[in-house]
Structures are given as structure tokens and as C-alpha cells.
Image (cartoon, rainbow, N blue to C red):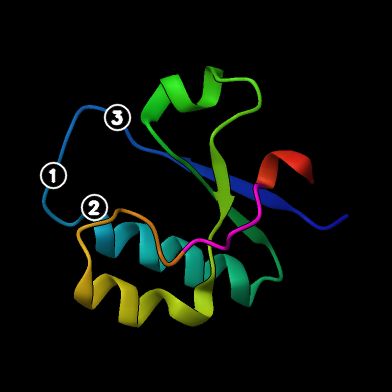
């Protein structure tokens, strides 16, 4: 299994958050790492199973330009099962 990092945000909107998530996801992909987005802040992390999705770096640019979601078009499969 390769390295994985999780991104969890909490506390509401803030300027630059989407760009930061996008940058972290793209950089992790360059290193061969998998990035996992935790939905709904700490509540999503504490949920059983965690509300987590693998972030797709190939779709970051389009998703960030068109959606208010803090995550790049997450894959439909849950990261919790991996």
C-alpha cells in the first residue's frame, strides 16, 4: 500500500481553501500518494465508517472551476473500505 494523506476542513468557508486542497491533491499525486477527503469535518471522521472519499487529481481543475465543493470530484467509492 502506498502513502495516503487525509484532508479535513472544519469551521466554515475561508478564502483559498479550494486552491489549497487542489494543490495538495495534485502534489500528492506527483509523489504517488493517494489523497482522501474527509467530508463534514470532524463529524465525518468520527462517523462509522468515516465519510471519506478518494480525491481524483485528474478532475481537480474542472471541479474547482465549476463547483462550490471543497473537494475535487471525489470518486464514487468510499476510502473507508480501502
Q: In this view, does 76 lie to the left or right of 41?
A: right
Name the spot of residue 79 as percent of width and height, x first. 67, 46
> In the displayed structure, would residue 5 be above or below residue 65?
above
Name the spot of residue 24 as percent of width and height, x first. 45, 61
Location of the N terminus (image quadrant):
bottom right
Dot 1: what SS?
A: loop
What secondary structure is the stretch in magenta mostly built from?
A: loop
- Contact between labelled residues 1 and 2, with CB atoms less than 8 Å apart: yes
> In the displayed structure, would residue 71 be above or below residue 44?
below
Residue placed under numbered mark 2 in the picture: 17
Residue placed under numbered mark 1 in the picture: 14
For the image, the number of numbered tags is 3
Disc 3 or 2, which lies upstream in sequence? 3
> In the displayed structure, would residue 80 be above or below residue 70?
above
Residue placed under numbered mark 3 in the picture: 10
Q: Residues within 10 Å of mark 1 (few under 14, many from 20)?
A: few
Q: Which residue is more in the foreground, 12 or 81?
A: 81
Name the spot of residue 22 as percent of width and height, x first. 37, 66
For the residues labelled 3 and 2, the Cα–Cα distance comes to 11 Å
Amino acid at each position: 500500500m502506498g502513502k495516503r494523506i487525509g484532508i479535513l476542513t472544519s469551521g466554515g468557508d475561508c478564502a483559498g481553501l479550494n486552491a489549497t486542497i487542489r494543490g495538495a491533491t495534485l502534489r500528492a499525486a506527483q509523489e504517488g500518494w493517494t489523497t482522501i477527503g474527509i467530508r463534514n469535518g470532524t463529524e465525518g471522521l468520527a462517523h462509522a465508517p468515516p465519510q471519506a472519499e478518494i480525491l481524483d487529481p485528474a478532475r481537480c481543475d474542472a471541479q474547482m472551476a465549476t463547483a462550490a465543493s471543497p473537494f475535487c470530484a471525489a470518486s464514487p467509492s468510499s476510502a473507508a473500505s480501502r
